[in-house]
Amino acid sequence: MPLTTVFSAGALTMAFALAAWVLARPHKKPYTLGMLSALCLLIGLANALGAAWAPVDWHVLPLIVAAIVLIPVWIIARGFGRVDLMAIAIHTGLGMKGGTLKGYENEIYSSLVVVSVAALSIWGLHNVLSTGPWLLWVGTAALVALNPVVRHLAMRLVQPKVRSSLLDEYREPAPLQRPDTLPDVVVIYVEGVDRRFLDTTTFGDLAEPLARLESQGLSFTGVRQIAGTGWSLAGMVATLSGVPVLPNGLRGKNKLGGIEDFMGTVASLGDVLDTHGYAMDYIVGADPRFAGIDVYYRTHKIGVIGLAEQIAMHPPEDVEAARIDRILDDQMTFDSGRLRQAALAEGEAPYLLVVETVGPHGRTGYLSRRATPDGKGVKSRDAHAVVRSLIDETVAFIDDIRARQDRVRPDRPLRIVVMSDHLSHNVNLPRGAEAFAARNTVLFLGDGTGQVAREGSMVDVYPTLLEWLGFAGPGAVANMGRSLLSPTQTLVETYGVAQVDRILTSDAALAARLWTERKD
């Protein structure tokens, strides 16, 4: 066999192997391996010259069909991190209402490239090696096996059957009541600072200020992450509405920006507090239109202070120092929170202030300017520095708003909630000991101390909040959540995290209920 043929066959084999690796993992970023597979394909086809470009015969048709079928399914799998038959079922049931591919441009591009590389690699190998039709049929079978729908159905066959829906676990928030004194409430989402950082064996004194705070309040140490709660928007929805974020047709995860009503029929914390006359704001140092976050808060009566509004609140030189790409550092977001809390505290109405931070975003985080040598916010891969910076800013903010509350509104109780919006997205960090691993930070400050070790999830924070704040009696339930202050079993205690996840990833009935539109 000529050396050029061997080289070409090797390049084409490598192209298919890389493409197959990407196709088998739609939840992973495909770009580097996808480009390498395309490069190997071009090298293999170019090196073989005429041999790889033989005329197409009918045996290649099944390969083409398998590739065409794979492309749209893999687009959906990329968009949701997995194939989501639930999304397809709901979308069909909604008559394709709102069904556009806006926001899926990257998924479409990567799907076209990777699937084309896989199919052309098989076709090129067939021609270069003159194997006869058997290789085309093997390649066709491989593309069929890599199809996320086929793999999803195969897993359903081998796994034990579970419930198909959790819809009958859904409960309207109850029992609701009015506390004797309406508390002021501040909710702080510390981006990705989950409980692992409190493990001193793994991280030393990195989170020591947070540990001191924990000793002053009520800490929930068994709050797990279930499907539909693992990113910033979803973590906030889970803890303020008691439900996971399941797909709305083909819209899911961070592609919910095109909707006009965000779970408007799901009674959330903002809706409950609105009935008691609360003034309410949400603050974030980024564009709140991302993923439909602004629509969620406004749907549930909470005002939105985002990037543009914060810029208008501070001197230009401070904004310039705080700006990191398209976000503001957490120091400025907390400064905006101080200003807004001061204004709210001067008013007569009780208030809710929600502050979302962005620092420990993933492997690359955002370091606030107070922690940098030149006083400018920067991107940083030093996870320890980014996490400690956010914790220090959080503790300083809490100290300041407590002091102001004591001065300005001593007759009004201030309740503060500190939560990770989701588990850390930094894959380079150790998980921590079992007592800390895969558990979110949930800390209530202002009434009660100690630790609650019950197993729950982020959806259970909402009814727990209602009970702790005095808006619900003992045994509070709210939507999919159950109060962790009462003995009522949570979803995690009843089914376990793994089974809850398996149900939620195909729970069309529950998703349809959550996205039911208001009739007003």
Image (cartoon, rainbow, N blue to C red):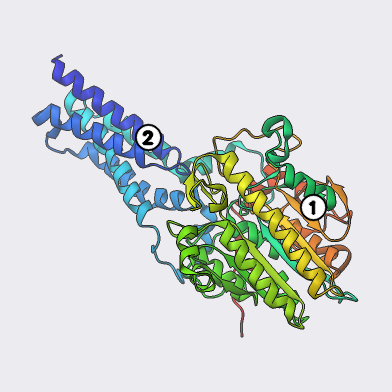
Q: Position of residue 109 (x, y in %)?
A: 32, 51
Could you tell me if the residues under marks 1 and 2 are in contact, i.e. CB atoms within 8 Å?
A: no
Q: Position of residue 492 (x, y in %)?
A: 75, 48
Name, please, the residue furthest toward the front: 374
Q: Nearer the viewer, residue 241 or 451?
A: 451
The structure residue drawn at horizontal position 80% and vertical position 67%, both measured from the top left corner, is 414
Question: Alpha-carbon neighbours of circle 2 within 10 Å: few (<14), some, or many (≥20)?
Answer: many
The structure residue drawn at horizontal position 76% and vertical position 62%, both measured from the top left corner, is 416
Residue type, mark 1 in image: Thr
The residue singled out by tag 2 in the image is 20
Numbered circles on residues, count: 2
Question: Alpha-carbon neighbours of circle 1 within 10 Å: few (<14), some, or many (≥20)?
Answer: many
The reply to whether residue 221 is in sight is no
Direction from residue 195 to residue 5 in the image, left or right: left
The residue singled out by tag 1 in the image is 490
Say whether disc 1 or disc 2 marks the residue closer to the N-terminus: 2
Direction from residue 259 to residue 161 in the image, left or right: right
Residue type, mark 2 in image: Ala
**SS category of the residue bearing label 1:** loop
Alpha carbon separation for disc pair 1 and 2:
40 Å
Q: Nearer the viewer, residue 43 or 504?
A: 43
Name, please, the residue furthest toward the bottom: 520
Q: Position of residue 368 (x, y in %)?
A: 55, 52
The reply to whether residue 62 is in sight is yes
**SS category of the residue bearing label 2:** helix
